[in-house]
Image (spheres, rainbow, N blue to C red):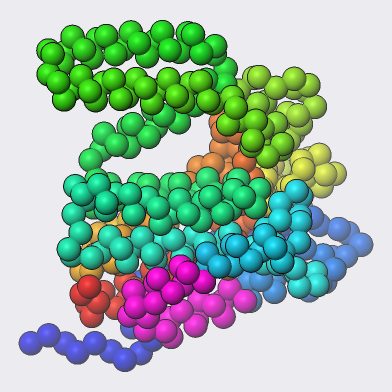
Amino acid sequence: MRRPESTSIFSNIDWITVLIWLAMLGLGWANVYSAVYDEDHPAILDMSQKYGKQLLWIAGAVVLAFILLIIDAEFHPTFAWIIYGVSMVSLVAVMFLGREVAGSKSWFRFGDFGIQPAEFAKFAACLALAKYLSDINLKMSDMRTRVVACGIFLLPTLLIILEKETGCAIVLLILILVPFREGLPGYLLLLALAMAFLFFASLVYTPLILISICGGLAVVAFIIAKKKLRSILTILTGLAIAAGIILSAKAVFEHFPAHQKKRIGVYLGIETGKKDKEWNENESIIAIGSGGFAGKGYLQGTQTKYDFVPAQETDFIFCTVGEEWGFLGSTFIVALFAFLIVRIILLAERQRSAFSRIYGYGVASIFLFHVLVNIGMTIRLVPVIGIPLPFFSYGGSSLWAFTILLFIFIKLDSQRLMILR
C-alpha cells in the first residue's frame, strides 16, 4: 500500500538544491560587498551602497522562494500560457513605458530600484515550452510542432532584441536544446551550430572564400548522394541557405547595437581601435591572474578595489572571485555551479510528468549558458555580451528571476508523484 503524500509544504523538497541556492546567495553577496567595498561606508545595511540594496533583493528572493513552495505545483502547468502572455505584454510595455539604461530601454524604474522584464521572460518561456511539448498528442517529427516550439522562445527573443538588450535575448536561444531531449533529431542542432559559425565566419573572411568552401563541400555531398533526387534537392537548399547567410551577414551585423558590434568585433579581431576596446577583457584577465593559487584574501583585491575592472559587481563579478579567492576559490565556485546543474538534470530525469521534465531541462540549459558565457567573458573565451552570473552578480531582477526559475522546478519535483500530466 502506497504511503499518503504529506500535506506539509516542505515535504519531499530537495534540500540539497535549496542549500546550494542558499550558499550561492551568501557567497554572491559577499563578493558584491567586496567588489564595491567602501571603507567610509562599511555597514552592510547601508542602503546607499549596492551591497545594502543587494541584501534587500536577497530578502525578497527568500520570500519569493517561500511563496513558490506554498503554491501547489499544478498551478504552473495550469497557468503556463497566462504567465507567458503576461511576460510578453510586459516586454512590449517596457519599450513604451520603460526608462533607458546604458542604451537599452528595458527597465521599469521605481526610485532607486529597477525591474527588467527580460529577466523574467526566461522562466515564462520555460513554462510555455514545457506546457506545449508535454501535450501527448504532439510529435516532434511534425514540422508544425518544431516551428511552434521554436516560436515560443523566439518571440521573446525578438522583443528583447528590439529593446536593445541583446545579451538577455541570446540566453533564450539556448532553449533550442530542450526539444532534443524530447526527440528532435540531433542533426538539426548541428545545422543550427553550423549556421551560427558561418554567420560569424562571414564577418571575418571574404564571401568568395566561404562560398568556394561551401561549394566544394556540396560537390562532395553530390558524389555521396549518388544522384538521388531528394538528396540533391536537400544539398541545393543547404547551399542556397549558406550563400544567403554569407552574403547577408555583414548587412545584418550592421543592425546590431553599437556596443554589441564593438564587443563582437574586438573578439573576432575586425574592430579598429582594439586596445581601448579590450580594456574590460584585459583588466579582467589581470585581476583573475593576480589571484594566483590561493588568492589575495577577502577584501584585499587591488584590481577590483581601485575600479580597474569595469562592471566588477555585475557582469565581471567573477574577477573578484579570481583575485581574492584565487584558483582554489574559483574552482570551488565553478564546481558548485556544475553540481547544481547536474543536480537539476538528475532531478528532471526522475520526473513522472513530461511537463516537469521539460521544464527542468529548460532550467538546466539557462543556468549552463549563463555560467559558461559569464565566466567565459572574464577569461576571454567568448565575446562580452553582458549577462550576469546567477546569484552572484549584483541586481534584483536577475536574482529574483533565477530564484523563481529554480524554485518552480523544486516545487514541481516535490510533487512529482502527484503531477502526471
Tell me residue 141's x, y (percent): 19, 47
Tell me residue 94's x, y (percent): 66, 63
Secondary structure character of the magenta stretch overall:
helix
Say left or right for 300 vs 382.
Answer: right
Q: Residue at x 18, y 65 (%)?
A: 136
Instruction: Identify the image quadrant of the N terminus.
Output: bottom left
Tell me residue 156's x, y (percent): 51, 56
Q: Residue at x 46, y 79 (%)?
A: 68
Q: Residue at x 34, y 54 (%)?
A: 148
Q: Residue at x 32, y 66 (%)?
A: 131
Residue 66 is covered by the magenta coloring: yes
* Residue 235 visible in the picture: yes
Residue 125, image quadrant: bottom left
Q: Which residues are magenta?
A: 60-86
Tell me residue 363's x, y (percent): 41, 58
* Residue 318 visible in the picture: no
Say left or right for 330 vs 193.
Answer: right
Image: 104 above or below 206: below
Instruction: Identify the image quadrant of the C terminus.
Output: bottom left
